[in-house]
Image: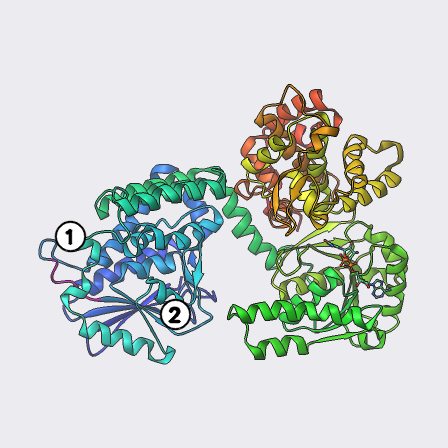
């Protein structure tokens, strides 16, 4: 095994510890790596010829963080093992911080400086925070921060305790609670790092600092006498306000469903009341409890490990690289304009076609609008704007599609219009080009009939707004070949989004689950359930929007359109008449949702939501007896989750990782749960079946537990046990 760190001492007695993990483009910390770092620190502190230490990286970045696979393994050892492991880590970082200092006089330490060439995240910042000084190269692409909260944990290697003591709770809040990342200059401005220098001067400046450091430079404020926490500790009047406010704010944002946010706040609050070393112990205890919580395990699995695996092509067929060079986008409406923007922004040449030049130009000006906003915020330069716009040709002329290796069609949702543009494009594009449709409701295999090359025909389903939504659903038609799938996946990778690949079926995967969720909410309104109960039940279980707000956002008339088409397709088997009674009435009343400033919610003239519309009760009176919060939540969750299980049963989904990641990124399915399959695993199949039986008895067959779930309940199986990716047929 090659070593993750190397150690060298120069003629002036400055030791350099260089982090450079072999065969990885980014350093990540492993347990072995940490042990090696520890031994090198011991060596430097023990060696009388060493005057100080530089900790740096052999790569362009410093480190991406802890290897989250290691965190997943640590959990297997149980709570005590995690706590012991974390305390050991604290011991090493504390050793760096004290650096051989005599505890009473605070003298005799050796200077240790962190020299960061680029990105430093998670433990990659917690380690520098334990050093006496952090010097970063002026690299505007570098990201500095503690993003742990984004995957359901919090900085547990002293980052929480040190950042709060360095900056104060209020200033540290966005970095800890929101995982805010900054470039080096901004990080210096915020007080996270100490110095930014030209990249070529980084090591020389670090050495200069080590050689010039005085005893006082090596004592952290919290180790010095009379230390007071910036902004005030909890019982200081200012601190009191901060902590009370933070508690309310965090609860308001998370609805209490994210264990990491609560534990982080507790670690900060309790830690602020005690000396530094006790605070580290408190941090370790809360960190352990978060790691032992099934929610954090599920979040790490879905939001980090599996999301990354899908982005790296876990389900990609083994064919040659299919990176897109020239993209044709048909239809420059809301979706086409967005697809053109994200593609041009990723460096792809784009031909944007619409029926009228004016419409094509309008589609291109959408990119201009986004880039202008970016310029205002200082994120986009004039050159970058010109470059991106220069890549988009807006035209009505299909001949411009010559040489396109991928087409994404986003014209009206009408099979005839789609067939027409498919034929027109195929007449011009190369024989081996791939043709994708962005349809949201029409079966891919049906649309493929208009193609002369159905093997090269595929669905690439974006979500709106395209530039913000990170999920892309790739749909295989009956005849779609491997090259088309690889092309779609390589395209999604180029535009830096997350793909899932599903088979063709009504509403594919995401919409198939979202529609029953919306319908269940509307159905409850028809039954007389208090609309506020429906909406709050959803939010209190971690869904970003209640079903009534969601239908307002996507528009009531779209709901009506989908309901009518589904009714035609399903005939007598159509199960949603009760939903339509509400939906169609709302449409008749002109309450078409947010775009009409009137829907299930009332809006002011500027489009701001005011609250639930009180006119609804006139038509659908609120019943005397109301269900419990839990029952409403079970209905709303099971409506989505059972669809996900059916999609798996029917082979629409072929990988539960895609089902979970797709649900969180596609429609915000309770991220704390790790996704529908993770939620069922947390609940246990037997308990899930029991809930379904209760719901089925009270509300009908739509809640009948799928055979797969029953079978798993009988055998005591979990989804991640039974369908673990390594068990997939190779
Ligand atoms: P839109 O009405 O905003 O845009 C459609 C565009 O296609 C219009 O600019 C129109 O002029 C153009 N067009 C129509 N016929 C054409 C033709 N023959 N040749 C060239 N251009 C033509 O619609 P949209 O919301 O962008 O939806 C486009 C497609 O994307 C639909 O299939 C829709 O189902 C799908 N989709 C929409 C969403 C969404 O949230 N709106 C999400 C996912 C997928």
Label 1 packing within 10 angstroms: few (<14), some (14-19), many (20+): few
Label 2: element kind? helix
Residue at the left extreme, as displayed: 105
Q: Is residue 422 above or below residue 283?
A: below
Label 1: element kind? loop
Whether residue 110 is in magenta: the answer is yes
Whether residue 685 is in magenta: the answer is no
The residue closer to the viewer here, 230 or 678, is 230
Q: Quadrant of residue 433?
A: bottom right
The residue closer to the viewer here, 116 or 321, is 116
Residue 226's label in the rendered image is 1
Percent x, y of residue 48: 14, 68
Q: Is residue 188 above or below residue 101?
A: below
The residue closer to the viewer here, 493 or 528, is 528
Name the residue that disc number 2 marks: 185
Colour setup of the view: rainbow
Give the main secondary structure, helix, strand or loop, of the magenta stretch: loop
Percent x, y of residue 404: 77, 73
Ligand 1 closer than 8 Å to label 2 CB: no
Q: Which residues are magenta?
A: 106-111
């Amino acid at each position: 095994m090659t070593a993750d760190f190397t150690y060298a001492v120069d003629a002036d007695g400055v030791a350099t510890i260089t982090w450079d993990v072999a065969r990885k483009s980014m350093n990540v910390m492993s347990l072995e790596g940490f042990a090696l770092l520890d031994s090198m620190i011991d060596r430097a502190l023990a060696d009388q010829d060493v005057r100080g230490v530089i900790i740096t990286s052999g790569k362009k970045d410093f480190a991406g963080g802890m290897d989250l696979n290691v965190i997943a393994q640590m959990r297997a050892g149980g709570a005590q093992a995690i706590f012991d492991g974390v305390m050991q880590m604290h011991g090493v970082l504390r050793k760096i911080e004290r650096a051989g200092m005599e505890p009473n006089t605070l003298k005799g330490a050796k200077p240790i400086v962190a020299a960061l060439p680029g990105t430093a995240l998670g433990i990659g910042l917690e380690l520098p925070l334990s050093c006496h000084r952090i010097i970063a190269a002026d690299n505007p692409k570098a990201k500095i921060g503690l993003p742990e909260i984004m995957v359901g944990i919090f900085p547990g290697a002293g980052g929480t305790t040190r950042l709060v003591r360095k900056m104060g709770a209020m200033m540290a809040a966005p970095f800890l609670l929101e995982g805010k990342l900054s470039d080096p200059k901004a990080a210096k401005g915020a007080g996270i790092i100490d110095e930014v220098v030209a990249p070529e001067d980084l090591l020389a400046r670090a050495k200069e600092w080590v050689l010039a450091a005085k005893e006082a430079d090596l004592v952290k404020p919290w180790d010095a006498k009379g230390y007071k926490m910036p902004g005030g500790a909890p019982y200081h009047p200012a601190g009191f306000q901060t902590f009370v406010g933070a508690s309310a704010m965090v609860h308001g944002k998370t609805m209490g469903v994210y264990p990491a946010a609560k534990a982080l706040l507790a670690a900060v609050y309790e830690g602020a009341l005690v000396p530094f070393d006790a605070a580290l112990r408190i941090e370790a205890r809360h960190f352990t409890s978060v790691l032992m919580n099934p929610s954090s395990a599920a979040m790490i699995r879905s939001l980090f490990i599996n999301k990354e695996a899908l982005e790296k092509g876990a389900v990609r067929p083994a064919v040659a690289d299919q990176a897109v060079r020239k993209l044709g986008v048909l239809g420059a409406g809301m979706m086409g304009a967005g697809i053109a923007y994200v593609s041009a922004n990723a460096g792809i040449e784009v031909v944007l076609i619409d029926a009228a030049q004016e419409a094509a130009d309008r589609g291109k000006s959408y990119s201009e609008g986004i880039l202008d906003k970016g310029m205002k915020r200082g994120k986009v330069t004039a050159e970058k704007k010109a470059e991106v716009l220069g890549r988009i040709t807006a035209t009505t002329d299909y001949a411009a599609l010559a040489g396109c290796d991928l087409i994404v069609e986003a014209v009206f949702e009408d099979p005839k219009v789609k067939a027409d543009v498919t034929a027109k494009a195929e007449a011009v594009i190369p024989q081996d080009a791939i043709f994708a449709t962005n349809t949201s409701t029409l079966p891919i295999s049906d649309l493929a009939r208009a193609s002369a090359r159905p093997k090269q025909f595929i669905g690439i389903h974006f979500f709106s707004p395209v530039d913000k939504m990170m999920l892309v659903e790739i749909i295989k038609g009956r005849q779609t070949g491997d090259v088309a799938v690889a092309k779609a996946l390589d395209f999604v990778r180029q535009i830096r989004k997350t793909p899932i690949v599903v088979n063709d079926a009504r509403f594919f995967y995401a919409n198939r689950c979202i529609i029953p969720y919306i319908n269940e909410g509307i159905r409850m309104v028809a039954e007389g359930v208090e609309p506020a109960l429906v909406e709050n039940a959803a939010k209190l279980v971690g869904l970003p929007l209640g079903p009534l707000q969601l239908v307002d956002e996507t528009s009531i008339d779209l709901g009506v359109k989908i309901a009518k088409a589904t009714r035609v397709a399903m005939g007598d088997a159509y199960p949603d008449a009760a939903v339509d009674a509400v939906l169609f009435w709302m449409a008749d009343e002109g309450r078409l949702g947010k775009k009409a400033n009137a829907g299930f919610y009332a809006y002011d003239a500027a489009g701001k939501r005011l609250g639930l519309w009180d006119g609804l009760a006139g038509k659908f009176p609120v019943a005397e007896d109301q269900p419990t919060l839990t029952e409403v939540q079970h209905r709303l969750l099971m409506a989505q989750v059972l669809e996900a299980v059916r999609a798996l049963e029917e082979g629409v989904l072929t990988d539960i990782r895609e089902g979970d990641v797709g649900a969180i990124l596609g429609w915000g399915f309770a991220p704390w749960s790790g996704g529908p399959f993770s939620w069922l695993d947390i609940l246990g199949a037997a308990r899930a079946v029991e809930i379904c039986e209760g719901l089925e008895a009270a509300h009908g067959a739509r809640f009948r537990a799928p055979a797969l779930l029953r079978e798993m309940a009988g055998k005591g199986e979990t989804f991640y046990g039974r369908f673990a990716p390594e068990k997939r047929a190779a």
